[in-house]
Image (cartoon, grey):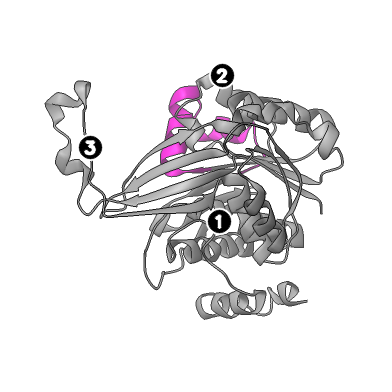
């Protein structure tokens, strides 16, 4: 399969606050918030939803194509992705503009407060499936410039390319009409619990009405695993216990990567969900969205420690 990944390309600035954000929030003063959190760590990492997904797919033996925009400071990042099995030929660098940047602060309860600088991502709509990937077999539309996400959904429907709609953080920004536009005839809607509730509230649709518009549904639920509804069957996907929890940033991207690589290999839905769950756990155990590493052999061995395998992942080793 030719898999195309769209979404942000960014540098992540990861901070840790050694306390709880909620201790600084006053219920009667939420209309005039002015807060500053003194953090004890700061680390700059490669990030962005598109490379995060593509990197993990590369570890699992895939070779996805990223279609996205980056800034003039992207050079070393391109080499990193190509080194790890990603096709970066459709990543277009915008002169005199910085790559987008994600600033996230995580407290001791794993709550997060984040900001995102759009940078070169603002030019994402200048790219087109018709130019860079007209024969794609599967695409994912993950958080990106809003106009680009809308355009890509239209192009995928026009070209007959099945696509996963992954609004993620943009679910908070989009209105009901924008969300409905992305949902329409997508092969799968991929969200976490909070985002799923936002979508239902903003669109006014219940789950039955949403399922009438989409092909499948993935709702990730952190340590409680995930719900996967596909082919008229609902699967409960358990989480894989991490050896340690360092940072949750990017775990959802890794889950989608594992799921998409499984779809590429034609694995059963339940297995695909479990591959996604394990891929997410690797990210939890590291600081950074692309700091984890494993070979397919190592991944399969760990999978078999947690799930009844019966050789279903032998295809990853071939």
* Whole-percent x, y for residue 306 in the image: 50, 76
- Where does residue 298 sit, x and y in percent of width and height? 60, 78
Labels in figure, total? 3
Range of residues picked out in magenta: 191-217
Residue under the point 33% across and 46% down: 105
Classify mark 1: residues with Cα within 10 Å, few (<14), some (14-19) or many (20+): many
The residue nearer to you, when weighing 189 against 286, is: 286
Q: Which residue is mark 1?
A: 255
Q: Which residue is mark 2?
A: 177
Q: Residue at x 62, y 60 (%)?
A: 56
Q: Secondary structure at mark 3?
A: loop
Instruction: Give the labeled residue for mark 3.
Output: 36
Q: Earlier in the sequence, mark 1 or mark 3?
A: 3
Q: Is residue 58 visible?
A: yes
Q: Residue furthest right?
A: 135
Magenta-span inclusion, residue 193: yes
Horizontal placement of 164 versus 22: left or right? right
Alpha-carbon span between mark 1 and mark 2: 27 Å
Quadrant into which the N terminus falls: bottom right
Give the alpha-carbon distance from disc 2 to disc 3, as whole Å.
35 Å
State yes or no: residue 152 in magenta. no
Residue at 57% x, 79% y is 304
Query: Which picture quadrant has residue 119?
Result: top right
From the top left corner, tell me how far across and down residue 43 is, in percent. 41, 54
Q: As drawn, which residue projects farthest toward the front?
A: 96
Measured as percent of width and height from the top left, residue 173 is found at 47, 26
């Amino acid at each position: 399969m030719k898999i195309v990944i769209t979404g942000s390309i960014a540098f992540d600035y990861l901070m840790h606050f050694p306390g709880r954000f909620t201790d600084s929030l006053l219920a009667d003063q939420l209309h005039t918030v002015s807060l500053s959190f003194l953090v004890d760590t700061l680390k700059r990492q490669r990030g962005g939803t598109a490379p995060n997904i593509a990197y993990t797919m590369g570890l699992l033996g895939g070779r996805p194509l990223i279609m996205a925009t980056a800034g003039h400071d992207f050079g070393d990042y391109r080499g990193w992705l190509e080194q790890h099995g990603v096709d970066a030929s459709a990543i277009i660098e915008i002169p005199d503009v910085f790559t987008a940047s994600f600033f996230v602060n995580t407290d001791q309860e794993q709550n997060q407060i984040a900001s995102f600088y759009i940078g070169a991502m603002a030019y994402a709509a200048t790219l087109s499936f018709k130019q860079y990937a007209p024969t794609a077999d599967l695409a994912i539309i993950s958080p990106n410039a809003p106009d680009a996400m809308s355009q890509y959904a239209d192009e995928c429907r026009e070209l007959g390319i099945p696509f996963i709609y992954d609004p993620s953080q943009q679910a908070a920004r989009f209105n009901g009409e924008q969300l409905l536009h992305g949902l329409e005839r997508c092969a799968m809607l991929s969200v976490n619990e909070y985002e799923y509730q936002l979508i239902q509230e903003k669109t006014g649709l219940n789950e039955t009405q949403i399922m009438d518009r989409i092909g499948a549904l993935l709702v990730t639920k952190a340590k409680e695993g995930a719900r996967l509804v596909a082919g008229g069957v609902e699967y409960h996907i358990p989480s894989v216990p991490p050896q340690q929890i360092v940072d949750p940033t990017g775990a959802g991207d890794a889950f989608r990567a594992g799921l998409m690589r499984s779809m590429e290999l034609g694995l059963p839905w339940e297995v695909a969900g479990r591959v996604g769950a394990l891929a997410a756990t690797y990210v939890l155990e590291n600081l950074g969205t692309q700091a984890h590493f494993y070979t397919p052999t190592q991944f399969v061995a760990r999978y078999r420690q947690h799930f009844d395998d019966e050789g279903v992942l032998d295809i990853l080793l071939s």
